[in-house]
């Protein structure tokens, strides 16, 4: 079945460091891909998305490119801030489902130190 | 605009007791989702409603879990009787018509079964 795999956390970085959180997926066809973020004590929030191969999603300085050839959707940010500390979830919505079904990875905790 | 509201935020019960969680989605969102999030894992869909109809409840353990969405707005998720393994965070999310790829999550209810 469809699945999402994320890199193990926690990821600990100093402020202004470069961030990469790896995400790979297994799915048939062309799923839509998402990154959600969960700040402490809050619900998950959609960070960015991409719906077809080679699309780049971006928001708040974060970027991720839909790579069909490597089945990946890695999250990147050029300079992280303490306020970026959160849990990041990669997710997919199966091809042609149009149902809103989301399959999540296990989450990666990011800790940014001043 | 108010977000997805869930209550209670925390609940501690003894095993074999019943428990109920309540969710109020964003106004105008006809699709409502209940997710289960175990510690260190991503959310897993339990049930999805389109208005008052449960259109996907394949992952809901129907021997002890039940849900309802009367009048297609608020929803209640119930567990009876609760087991130790039910300790988790229960998340509610909603999405607007035709935009099921963008889900808005509530803060969740953290359930502890003793």
Image (cartoon, coloured by chain):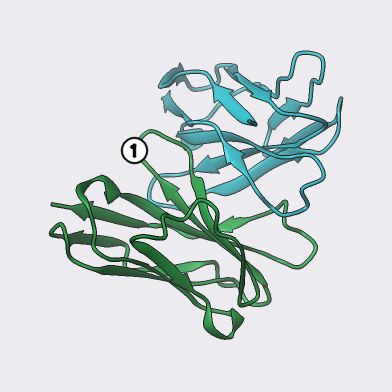
Chain colours: A cyan, B green
Q: Position of residue A31 (x, y in %)?
A: 77, 35
Above or below, A108 against B28 in this view is: above
Above or below, A13 against B69 in this view is: above
Which quarter of the figure has residue B63?
bottom left
Q: Seen from this angle, which residue lies furthest bottom?
A: B71
Q: Nearer the viewer, residue B67 or A65?
A: B67
Label 1 packing within 10 angstroms: few (<14), some (14-19), many (20+): few
Secondary structure under badge 1?
loop
Q: Residue at x 46, y 44 (%)?
A: A39
**Image quarter hosting the C terminus of chain A:** top left
Q: Residue at x 42, y 27 (%)?
A: A111
Q: Position of residue A93 (x, y in %)?
A: 70, 42
Question: As drawn, is A78 to the left or to the right of B46?
Answer: right
User: How many labels were placed on the picture?
Assistant: 1
Q: Position of residue A28 (x, y in %)?
A: 77, 29
Q: Seen from this angle, which residue lies furthest top?
A: A70
Q: Nearer the viewer, residue B96 or A114?
A: B96
Q: Residue at x 44, y 52 (%)?
A: A42
Question: As drawn, is A88 to the left or to the right of A95?
Answer: left
Q: Chain of mark 1?
A: B
Above or below, A95 against B63 in this view is: above
Q: Residue at x 78, y 52 (%)?
A: A98
Q: Nearer the viewer, residue A1 or A33?
A: A1
**Image quarter hosting the N terminus of chain A:** top right
Q: Position of residue A59 (x, y in %)?
A: 71, 39
Which quarter of the figure has residue A35?
top right
Question: As drawn, is A81 to the left or to the right of B6?
Answer: right
What residue does disc 1 label? B39
């Amino acid at each position: 079945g469809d699945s999402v795999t994320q890199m193990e956390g926690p990821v600990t970085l100093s402020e202004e460091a470069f961030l990469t959180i790896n995400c790979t997926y297994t799915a048939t066809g062309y799923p839509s891909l998402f990154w959600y973020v969960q700040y402490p004590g809050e619900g998950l929030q959609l960070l960015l998305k991409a719906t077809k191969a080679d699309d780049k999603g971006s928001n708040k300085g974060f970027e991720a490119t839909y790579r069909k050839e490597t089945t990946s959707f890695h999250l990147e940010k050029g300079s992280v801030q303490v306020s970026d500390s959160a849990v990041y979830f990669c997710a997919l919505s199966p091809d042609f489902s149009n149902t809103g079904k989301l399959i999540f990875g296990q989450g990666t905790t990011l800790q940014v130190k001043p | 605009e108010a977000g997805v509201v869930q209550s209670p935020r925390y609940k501690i019960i003894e095993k074999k007791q019943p428990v109920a969680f309540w969710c109020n989605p964003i106004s105008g969102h006809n699709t409502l989702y209940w997710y289960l999030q175990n510690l260190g894992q991503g959310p897993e869909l339990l049930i999805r409603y389109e208005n008052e109809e449960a259109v996907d409840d394949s992952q809901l353990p129907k021997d002890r879990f039940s849900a309802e969405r009367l009048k297609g707005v608020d929803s209640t998720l119930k567990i009876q009787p609760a087991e130790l393994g039910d300790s988790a965070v229960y998340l509610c999310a909603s999405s607007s018509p035709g935009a099921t790829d963008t889900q808005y999550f509530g803060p969740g209810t953290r359930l502890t079964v003793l």
